[in-house]
Image (spheres, rainbow, N blue to C red):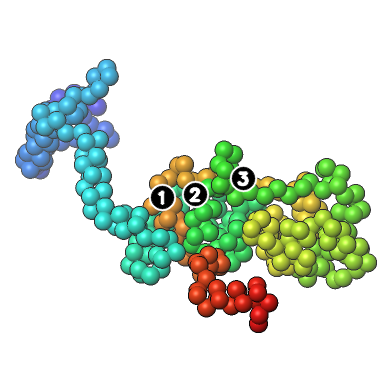
Amino acid sequence: MADGKRIDEATGTSTVGHEWDGIEELDTPMPRWWLYTLYATIVFAIAYCVAYPAWPLIDRATHGILNWTSRSAHAEEMQTEGARRAPTIAALARIPIERLPEDSKLLDTAVAGGASAFKVHCVQCHGSGAQGFKGYPNLNDDDWLWGGDLKAIEQTLRNGIRQPGNDETRTSMMPAFGRDQILTPAQIEEVVSHVLTLSGREKPSAAARRGAAQFATNCAACHGAGGEGNRTLGAPKLTDAIWLYGGDRESIRQTIHNSRNGVMPAWGSRLDPVTIKMLSAYVHSLGGGEDFVPPAPKPSTAAPSAEAAATAARTKNGKP
């Protein structure tokens, strides 16, 4: 290792005095453009620290002469976006959900908004594609426990399923036929055999025929005599291949023995009505949504016409 500096003959540049195995390091000055860039970044950093929040203090940071904060900028952006969306939100708030399909543009907006809300509030149970999991319904098919039209979905979302403290929640209670000793283990096996024949998963057998009698006594009141289900009670259809908790023998046995009583939050206490309406539109759009079925008209209570009144009077007096 050499100790002294010298001028390199080939380049005319001074060496730094280091040498290793015949290789020397030149003390080449930095390019001017590089130095100017370095000085510019130093000046920029000083100006930034003066203008914007930069130095942490005990309970806050310096504000800077511009008094800018990311929180205030975010609040301003949210206010601007809220003003832009206000007419659409107002339109969604006014329209009854069953009439939403009449306005295709508003419906598309609701579906898009519902998709965003679904990713925040619903994917944890129903999955990112709404495919569901064991015990959590698949929202893409057309099997609905409580109804699949827009109004029914909105009602389910708003009031939840078996939500404590909500008087309007969807609720029904399946007995635990084995745990509560309503049926013996042998009778439960027979009912399982009958249920499996309803969906074509097993062929009719003597056990299934005995189970049909137990089914008629204990299950038909909710699930229907043929296992067609009852949406008023949230009783599932037993004649198809869609099963919420599994359709194999062991899963059905566990369902009958211990019962199933899933719970869904009442989103009406957590989300605003427009968000619930948009969520309803999105879920309905996934592929299993159904047309709205209006309730049957109530019998007219209007006063009878003069002709009807005269006819009634003649009948009362014994005249045809």
Q: Percent position (x, y) of residue 58?
A: 27, 17
Q: CA distance from mark 2 to mark 3?
A: 12 Å
In screen coordinates, is 310 left or right of 260? left
Q: Which residue is mark 3?
A: 162
x then y, percent, for residue 294: 51, 67
Q: Label 3 is placed on what type of residue?
A: Arg
**On the picture, is 130 further left or further right than 27?**
right
The residue beneath circle 2 is 158
Task: Please tell me how crowded label 2 is: few (under 14), some (14-19), or many (20+) other residues with Cα within 10 Å.
Answer: many
What residue sits right under mark 1 in the picture?
273
Q: CA distance from mark 2 to mark 1?
A: 8 Å
In this view, 150 is above or below 56:
below
The residue type indicated by label 1 comes to Pro
Which residue: 10% across, 28% down? Answer: 65
- Total tally of numbered discs in the picture: 3
Q: Amino acid at mark 2?
A: Arg
Please, what secondary structure does the residue beneath circle 3 have? loop
Q: Is residue 247 left or right of residue 232?
A: right
